[in-house]
Amino acid sequence: MKSTHPRPAALLAAGRRVARSLLLALTLLLALTATGAEPFATGQPSNSPSELKNWWKNSVIYEIYPRSFQDSNGDGIGDLNGITSRLDYLQKLGVEAIWLSPIYPSPQIDFGYDISDYEGIDPQYGTMADFDRLVAEAKKRDIRVVMDMVMNHSSDKHKWFEESRSSRNNPKRNWYVWRDGKGQPPNNWQSDFGHSAWEWDEKTRQWYYHKFYIQQPDFNWNNPEVSKAFDNILKFWMAKGVAGFRFDAITTLFEDPDWIDDKELKDANGKTFLNNYGDVSLDDARTNNLPGVHPVMVHVRTVEDSVKPNVFPGRRVLIGETYVPTINDLLRMYGTKDKPEFQLPMDTQLGFINKLDVATFRSKLNDVETKIDDNTPLLVFDNHDNARIDMRYGDGVHDTAITRVISTVLFASKGSALFYYGAEIGMKTTPPTRKEDVKDPVGLTGWPKDKGRDGERTPMQWDDSEYAGFSTAKPWLPVPPNKDKINVKAEESDPNSLLNWYRALIRLKKTNPVFISGEQVMLDTDNTKVLSWLRKGPGKGAIVTAANFTAEPQTVNLNASSAGVKGTRSKTLLKSPDTSDPATIDKVELPPFGVYIGEVE
């Protein structure tokens, strides 16, 4: 029988482990204190009845690409149990909801966005029991789970489409978009993944329409049976405890009923030009953002409201992937008081400017803060379909500082914030260098001009081990070599790290009354180097924020008297490294890509 009493050496080792743990805890506390924040006790510090009901109005939502977040079973692919194992990390970060890109059964042609069963879990990601456990464990940490809902198309392996293509007389034939064509496609419409949006089916001798990949046939939303089917799908997942849905490609549900050709885009000289796939560029006005989307979402909202919440109190949230051209188009996505639609359609006009231009940022941010009535903005700068922040905004030298600037706009502005896994540690876009390494269908079609979306989907970098703590096996996509320096473990103990900056910003957003509900007013509006704004609320101290958009030091005047705020001194709430506390807000000095946030006194 083994002794149950520890030997002196074991006691010494145990003491050392305790000491290391205490040292790490102290280091983390000092790191957050240095940035003006304290560690989160829960993901949702405030829980008044009104805030619980409309929890999404000042929310922090984190997109997880499940294949790439955490592998728990050593097959190189992330899974649900892996996500569950990282919930403590997400809670500490301050996340209130996680949006999961599709985890349904799928042939994985488009890595889950080609769904073959809307009421199951793909075995690569686990089981329904694993999903239930994720929801339950997330609940313990005040984190909600939001599902991706793909209503524009299914996989061609879905039983509905297999029935639809079996014959022209099949009851589900009209569930998808079928057209005749005399030896060629019915019109010139293009797939967003390249080439014609029409695919010939030899068996039934008609063309089917696919806005995206060939294996993703579009539903016919003029058929009420399709709507009824999705009513049941939404109710199924709400019964499982999800807190809402993000609607993929929602603006593409309908097509021009007259099937008229799209117009060719032309350059300044009146000549047509080719896109990355070698096709003539078209405006896609007849297959995107058509009016029929709005009645569908009004109906979806009634379905959402008909099912009583069963895990969290308060309403579920409907998030829209809404790439629309104007602020008025975005406003329409919210619906009206009598006919509400999305609570949070994504404001992609600000987040995907893709250049650090102060005037454009100011204009777009002011639009979404002042021109959508009393609705809540949803700001977003990154996702699984776009290159990460470094490639779209970085300069290769100040990427970390630039990400601080972008994250300040994201979290210090009024409204809700959505960000993509790995942004908080500064993960970089790492596209494949050879076509034979490409996994994404976009890259397979568009190579070499468009290398696809693999570069922003690489495994989460948890530590500096061989596979970055993501897996014990070779991952489905290569781990970037920068994982030696860019990883959670390294950044947790660095008070000036991007990770601790995100934690401090999020805590400020969730705990400061002005950041929770204060209105937003632009300051120093003629400045082309520094973006500055004011947050204020009745009976609450005003907060000024300034972000230097240049690689040179800048001095900015944050005097807010024009906005009815008196006082020339401020209490620093948060500042980037090397930024000094100003003697007066009339003269705030910012280092290259520096940020200052202060409460006016």
Image (cartoon, rainbow, N blue to C red):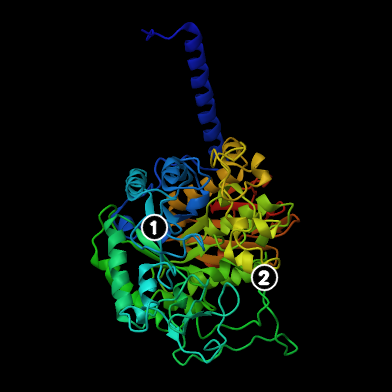
Front in this rendered view, residue 222 or 206: 206
Q: In this view of the protein, can residue 525 be seen by the observer?
A: no
Residue 163: % across, % down: 35, 74
Amino acid type of the residue tagged 1 in the rendering? Val
Name of the residue lying farthest toward the front: 203
Q: For the residue labelled by badge 1, is the local secondary structure a helix, a strand or a loop?
A: strand
Tag on residue 539?
none
Looking at the rendered structure, the kind of residue marked 2 is Asp
- Taking depth in this image into account, of 350 and 79 the one nearest to the observer is 79
| Residue 318 position within the rendered picture, expressed as x and y whole percent measured from the top left | 38, 66
Occupied quadrant, residue 361:
bottom right
User: Any mark on residue 146, and which?
Assistant: 1
- Classed neighbour count for the residue bearing mark 2: other residues with Cα under 10 Å, few (<14), some (14–19), many (≥20): few
Q: Which mark is residue 526?
A: 2
Q: Position of residue 90 (x, y in %)?
A: 46, 45
Tell me: residue 66, above or below residue 19. Answer: below
